[in-house]
Amino acid sequence: MSPIDETPSSLSEDLALALRLADAADAVAMGRFDAADLRIDTKPDRTHVTEADLATERAIRAILDAERPGDAILGEEYGTSGDTTRRWVIDPIDGTHNYMRGIPVWATLIALTVDGVPEVGVVSQPALGRRWWAATGGGAWTNGRDGEPRRIHVSDIDDIAQSSISFQSIEQWDDVGLVPTLERLARAVWRDRGYGDALPYMWLAEGRLELVAEFGVKEYDIAAIAPIVREAGGRFSAFDGSDRIDAESSLATNGVLHDAFLAFLHARSAT
């Protein structure tokens, strides 16, 4: 049975479309990856955007406009269009700074939210030949080494001291005044690394990490990630423990340790 067959009928067509959107995005983004003449501009917020970010989002939007004209869209580069309970949330290239430096750790993130809840998510990393996807009730999946879909699941580690974590970047934690908390966390766990962007969340979903946390994130940064983590058996919340994806923070765990990590982080951040 295929992943689409195991997806609830109400979401199966949406998941199939999301995977086709990822195919189109991969083709556009890979066409300009590591190009010597890649055009790079600076946005008003002083972050960078490449011609590939813009072209990739346009390609996704063109398909959605044709096949889901009644759905709303939120994209990092072109903002919001439409106002319905069904909304596609797109980050055309998550990891633009890696992309523009020729580092292959970047992804296209595609999500469908219904009434604000992420129900479908696809994370595609074509430069690494990897993709992950999920729809609520259908499990979380990735492409195996043989190219066939493989179901994934989080780890069952239940001790913070034995856990491996990714904190994204020190700058994020410094911006919210939590570097001391991060230092205490790093000392409490078995291993810590700042892998960055979407990839560590996917490793968590595969059972390779037990926590990923970051701050300053937007909906398009995490909407596609949330259903993959949850369908893999993990938990995904904001730093305050809520299920909101607009709280500008994220905390993903293997589920078993979620409450323990929340308690540790908030106890330490209060001192």
Image (cartoon, rainbow, N blue to C red):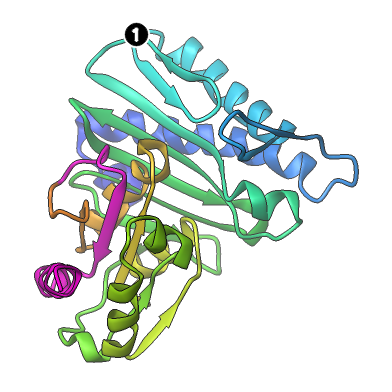
Q: Residue at x 60, y 35 (%)?
A: 25
Q: Is residue 252 magenta?
A: yes
Question: Going by the image, does 59 lie left or right of 214?
Answer: right
Q: Is residue 221 left or right of residue 134?
A: right
Residue 104 visible in image? yes
Q: Nearer the viewer, residue 260 or 266?
A: 266
Amino acid on which disc 1 is placed: Gly
Residue bearing the label numbered 1: 70
Residue 169 visible in rendering: no
Where is residue 269, by image quadrant? bottom left
Task: State the extent of the magenta-drawn residues as a range.
Answer: 243-271
Q: Residue at x 73, y 49 (%)?
A: 100
- The quarter of the displayed image where residue 211 is located: bottom left
Residue 58 to residue 198: above or below: above
Residue at 78% from the left image edge and 41% from the top image edge: 32
Q: Report x, y in % for residue 35.
A: 85, 46
Residue 74: say if magenta: no
Q: How many marks?
A: 1
Q: Position of residue 185 (x, y in %)?
A: 28, 80
Q: Give the quadrant of residue 26.
A: top right
- Residue 152 vertical position relative to residue 21 in the rendered view, above or below: below
Give the left or right position of residue 123, taking residue 92 as reference. Answer: left
- Location of residue 189 with respect to 140 vertically, above or below: below
Badge 1 marks a residue whose secondary structure is: loop
Residue 77: image location, x then y, percent: 55, 27
- Neighbours of disc 1 within 10 Å: few (<14), some (14-19), many (20+): some
Q: Is residue 147 left or right of residue 40?
A: left
196 versus 123 height, above or below: below
Q: Nearer the viewer, residue 271 or 173?
A: 271
x%, y% of residue 97? 65, 51
